[in-house]
Amino acid sequence: MRALSLVGAAVVSMALFVRAETPATAPSPRLPPVPSPSIGCDPCPLAPPALPPPTPVDDPTLPPLPARSPRNANYTIDARLDAERHTIQGSLILEWRNTTGQAQDTLPFHLYWNAFRNTRSTSARGEGRRAARITRGPDATRGFGYMQIESVRELSGGAETDLTPSLRYVQPDDANADDRTVAEVHTPSPIAPDATARFKIDWTSQMPYGDVGRSGWVHDYHFVAQWFPKIGVFWKGAWNAHQFHPFSEFFSDYGVYDVRLTVPQGYILGATGAMKNAVDNSDGTRTFHFHQDDVHDFAWVASRRMGEVRARFDETGFHPVDIRLLIQPEHSHLSARYVEATKIALRSYGTWSAPYPYDQVTVVDPAWTSASGGMEYPTLFTGGASVFSPRALQSPESVTIHECGHQFWYLLVGTNEFEEAWLDEGINSYHDEKAAQIALGPEGWGKRYFGMLAAGRGSRAPIPVIAPGVWLRRGDSEVAGLRKSGAFDAMARPTWGYRNADSYTVNAYTKPALSLQTLEGLVGDQVMTRILRTYARRYRFAHPTTEDFIAVVNEVAGQDYRWFFDQTWFSAEECDYAIEVRNRPARALAGYAEGPDGRPVLVTSAREEGHGKDARTFDSEVIVRRLGGVRLPVEIRVQFTDGRVVYETWDGQYRWTRFRYPGARVRAAEVDPFGKIAVDIDPGNNSWADNAPIAQRAASKWAMRWMFWLQNFLELHTLLG
Amino acid sequence: MILDAARRGLRRAGALWGLVAFLLLVNLATAAILAIPLAARLRDDLANHAAADNMLAGFDYPWWSAWSDARPETTFGPDILGAGFAFKNLDLLLRGRLPAGLFTMPDPERPEERGTPFDPAVLALGVAYLVLQVFLSGGVIAALRAPQPDWTVRGLLHGSGFYFGRLLRLALLILLVDAVVFALYAPFARWADVQAREAVSERTAIVWMLGRHALLLLALIAVNMLSSYARVLIVLEERSSALLALLSAGALCLGSFFRTFGHVLLMTGLAVVGLLLWSVLDGHWTTTGYKTQIVTFLLLEGLVFVRLFFRVATLGGQVTLARRLAGGPAEPA
């Protein structure tokens, strides 16, 4: 009896302790110490909270918003569209103020449409994602286009200096002499710092057919973007004017755009900015006058077929915005959804960064097979819809929220999309997932059927079928891409430095979005919101860099998170945590134990306790492993069969750690129970549960459903024999 | 005549419900060959994962996403849920992936790719099932042709074995016809896709896309009708030449096209209505534990039974029509 009491006392005393066991090896000296993780989250990333109220424009706790942009690249443009030949003749006056701090006599210009000039352009030499090619039939060459500068003159006083002879095509990225997407001109006299130079440029353009590039025509639908000679940006002490690459986007300075566009009468026209007036001309054309201050680009669309819907976003705490939706007739039943999604974006992004300051935004529903969909331009963006668009699939909502979101991350904060694509696409993707989940709930899973043999851009299979009971939470659909292509490249690379299109997509969109979701999990939603508000306000109308963003994170969070970005943004390492549990029957005490008088007493038992099916006492251990190279602090939740729940933390530095629970049996354990580590490429191995019967039932349930599919699949063969 | 043939076919199938149940058992047993290993694999992969709880209550997409990435050829995914199984199978058929990917139409811009990976075991099982059904069809038709429909397993197998050689030759001929259909269809599909791509409106494009799919489906149904009548003639008239039986079936169908095709379309339409009703039931029922799984199993097998029932009923109606159109002796009422 006494021996049994001693055994019981020993077991109980051991059961009172929970001990983590880690080997005595010091963490790698290359990485600085990481903060201790906190337990829980308020709120948790998997269930974002309701939208907080917007901050006042003059919130004293945040950086002040600038009243206007630097306006160092102002364009006055006159252009005429020949809708039959799909050509544009244009003339522009560029007022360029030298803010470089140095005298400049060489000015680079982007001539983006030369990417479609022929099959030897840099863009065409890529994977063919947006490359013109010869097709069959009478329209075999319609996919090609160009931008030809007819003349460049410097206007000084009343005189004009012809700079055209100085024009040279340059290829700063790949020395491809066939690429003409960047040209330089030289001024006879340097332009002094802070001086303003005026240039008059005349050009002609051939629009490519619109099923490949973002610009192009399809029937009477003309989407016109990157369409005028655009001066490069002087950035980080040098001219930054990259060629157009297969995956790259754009980068330009802020200014005032005053644009007159002449198109055939009967065309509906949408553009950046507000329409001042429209005048009918005697030659059967109509000239539209648009104006917008403080933007860095100008795009427009003209078509006979588009319908027009007007709405207004007017909510407390936000600048009122007129919404103009230009929609294809067959999608008119989706108008309300387009408008609502635009409002969701204006509301959400305005809350998380700073309110949209412009008076209007134009939403364009692209024409069938046009590749212009899903793209952003200042105060104008394109969505994308299908005739059959069940709400559960959140289309066109998701693309609308994303592209409207670019008004905040791309337009108001003008990052370099060539070199740091993640700063606009990644932050935007992080926000659009969050906005959609808050406003629309989880997204359904569906598949579209009976489409074309060749899946081209701008076209979708017509019939959507939604899988009942399958819902995607924030980030769920992105993890697969990260798993497939995340290890190809470090995220922080220029767009033309990625291995392929998949790697670009993962590193520009997926990985930064998931890593920001992870950062939100680490610092908390309120701090994350403050980080982005601070960043958005401090760098409105500016060209911040990744380092600027990291500096804001560290400033607002109050600690150095460089270690986080080193592992996620500047590395190609993967993040993968896994957990396993071992429940073993407790070892019965046999041997010498301490007796009541303090002297050793020999303890024996007829049989060891805990053996066989009726074992009542268990010793358990939980092992958490870090399978990937990314080291992040994690939380572990352990639930015991007696109902107790224990939370542990681990800094994730070594490859594994172990938690022992003598006298207890683990029922379930999970690493990252709150879903903070969104970059984990395999959330499925993050949990363990003592659930063999449940696994059996789940397996039989799904095997039966699959068997049903197979039975029908087999029976379908009788149609062929 | 169409309605009468349909009625008689349904009545005969009703009288032979045991035969239909036997066919269901064959279908179930064939599918179980792969379903049982899948169940074991799922059990092992879900064991000790919290995903098991999620999969029991619903569908754990993150777990499935990682699981299927490790198995690119898997056919287990959310696209088989609800009525999705029918769309998935129809899509596979119309893309020429049945049987065994013989008629696959590649993306014309990526001709080297042969479509998404597909479990070769499933494809092989499909071929085996096709041969098995060719074998059984002789016995089924023999049972249907009897004045008083009746059957025994022994009688079914006897009849199946007796006609198998001819029916197998016929099946090969029909596969050849299917190959011709797909070969003719592929350039038409590319041309229709060009029309769809060049359409001004998505609505017009949808008409082109769905239209060409519908046309292929109708063509395959017509070839199947030809095959069915050829089989009926082989059994009814004890034809020894599969080719001649096929030609006779062609003449019979062409000579009374609206009746023969109308009958097939009517039966197909009834089967689709059955599928829609089933979808409504399936959508309102949640499967979790073993009790609900038993009910779900009955529901699922009920639909397969109905499908097989309609196949037998269609054959029964075709036996009636073949007799009438060939001017043979009248059937008993």
Image (cartoon, coloured by chain):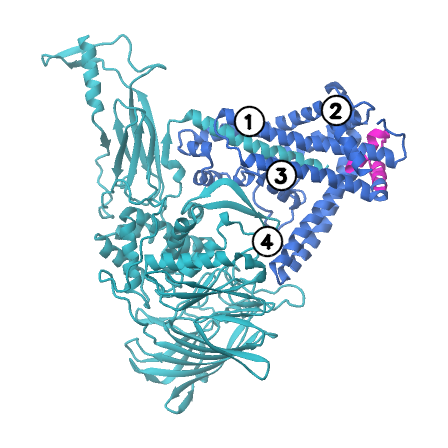
Magenta range: B227-251
Q: Are marks 2 and 4 on the same chain?
A: yes
- Element type where label 4 sits in the image: loop
Between A190 and A588, the one nearer to me in the picture: A588
Which residue is identified by label 4?
A: B110
Say the numbered circle drawn on residue B295: 1
Residue of label 3: B276
Q: Position of residue A651 (x, y in %)?
A: 25, 41
Chain B hue? blue
Foreground residue among B166 and B259: B259
For chain A, the rendered hue is cyan
Residue drawn at (53%, 31%), measured in percent from left and top?
A703
Is residue A200 visible in this depiction of the protein?
yes
- N-terminal of the pair, mark 2 or mark 3, is 2
* Subunit bearing disc 3: B
Q: Choose the circle earlier in sequence order: 3 or 1.
A: 3
Q: Tell me the crowding category of disc 1: few under 14, some 14 to 19, or many 20 or more residues within 10 angstroms, Cα based.
A: some
Return the residue nearer the eye: A486 or A278: A278
Residue B162: within the magenta?
no
